[in-house]
Image (spheres, rainbow, N blue to C red):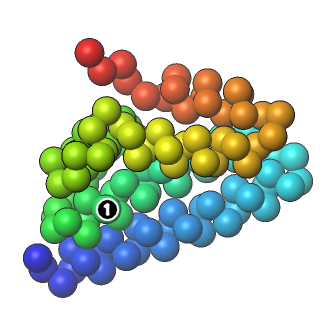
Amino acid sequence: MRESARIEGQRWLEQAQFDLKWARHLKSKGAYYLVCFLAQQVAEKALKAFLYAQGEELVVGHSVRRLSKQASEYDAQFQHGLYSTVIIFLLATQMDSQTTFLLEYITKRQPRMH
């Protein structure tokens, strides 16, 4: 694996962690619509970090489901979006009364896979 792919993976992971920090802060301020957006961003960036860490040189797209499918080529536990679902679930459970809204928002952003 090229060193730059490893560095790129670390960069994406740091961005995901930063977004998660802000999502938690915004939740405490009641900005739930922004938390919903950031939850999707955290899942997307974490998946991209994983893919770069595996040696991918270019990872494009915003679909958490598609990125999970791509990640499943390296780790079968990503199959059927298992990890992305867990990431989104963990974020959603931090939302208290907004859990349902968050899950609906994330689900609507993902293309249907048949």
Q: Which residue is mark 1?
A: 50
Horizontal arrangement in the rendering, residue 36 relative to residue 77 (left or right)? right
Dot 1: element: helix
Quadrant in which residue 18 is drawn:
bottom right
The N terminus sits in image quarter: bottom left
Horizontal arrangement in the rendering, residue 91 relative to residue 51 (left or right)? right
Q: Which x, y percent locates residue 73?
A: 16, 48
Horizontal arrangement in the rendering, residue 36 relative to residue 60 (left or right)? right
Q: Which x, y percent locates residue 96?
A: 81, 40
- At horizontal 17% and vertical 62% (from top left) the residue drawn is 56
Q: Which x, y percent locates residue 104?
A: 61, 24
Check disc 1 and give the amino acid type.
Answer: Phe
Quadrant in which residue 12 is drawn:
bottom left
Q: Which x, y percent locates residue 99?
A: 72, 34
Quadrant in which residue 49 is drawn:
bottom left
Residue 34 in view: no
